[in-house]
Image: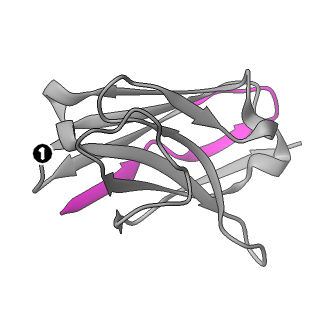
Amino acid sequence: VQLQASGGGLVQAGGSLRLSCATAGFNLDYYDIGWFRQAPGKEREGVSCISSKNGSTFYKDSVKGRFTISRDNAKNTVYLQMNNLRPEDTAVYHCTADYDPYGRTCKVNKYNYWGQGTEVTVSS
């Protein structure tokens, strides 16, 4: 199972980034995919997830209305569009996978696999 996040960078507050999670080694159709982030000195926190079957989504309260998760199973890729970024969004973002073949509701803090992250820095 491979998960590789990319798309991070340095952006000013109010700006946008789109993170990508390229997956390999498993059938994406059977996995819920999520994102967690970890800022220096802080605990890991689940940000968003999308279910395997019906595409239902979850967002952490602080990112609702600003972040959008989507998946393209044909490309084995999941995306996290992040708009109106804030300094408090600064963290390393990792994508995760949870085996859930009947999945209709993802759980952002439940996952079997995660990959190396991509760093997002939002300047004020």
- Image-quadrant location for residue 62: top right
- Please provide percent x and percent y for residue 68: 57, 25
- Inspect the image, locate mark 1, and give the three-letter code of the amino acid beneath it: Asn
Asked whether 60 or 68 is in front, the reply is 60
Q: Quadrant of the N terminus?
A: bottom left
Q: Is residue 54 magenta?
A: no
Residue at 36% x, 64% y is 115
Left or right of 50 in this view: 27? left
Q: Residue at x 22, y 48 (%)?
A: 23
Q: Residue at x 79, y 38 (%)?
A: 61
Q: Which residues are magenta?
A: 1-17
Image-based side of 114 in relation to 94, left or right: left
Check disc 1 and report the residue beneath it. Answer: 27
Query: 87 above or below 112?
Result: above
Q: Quadrant of the C terminus?
A: top right
Q: Residue 57, image x and y in percent?
A: 52, 30
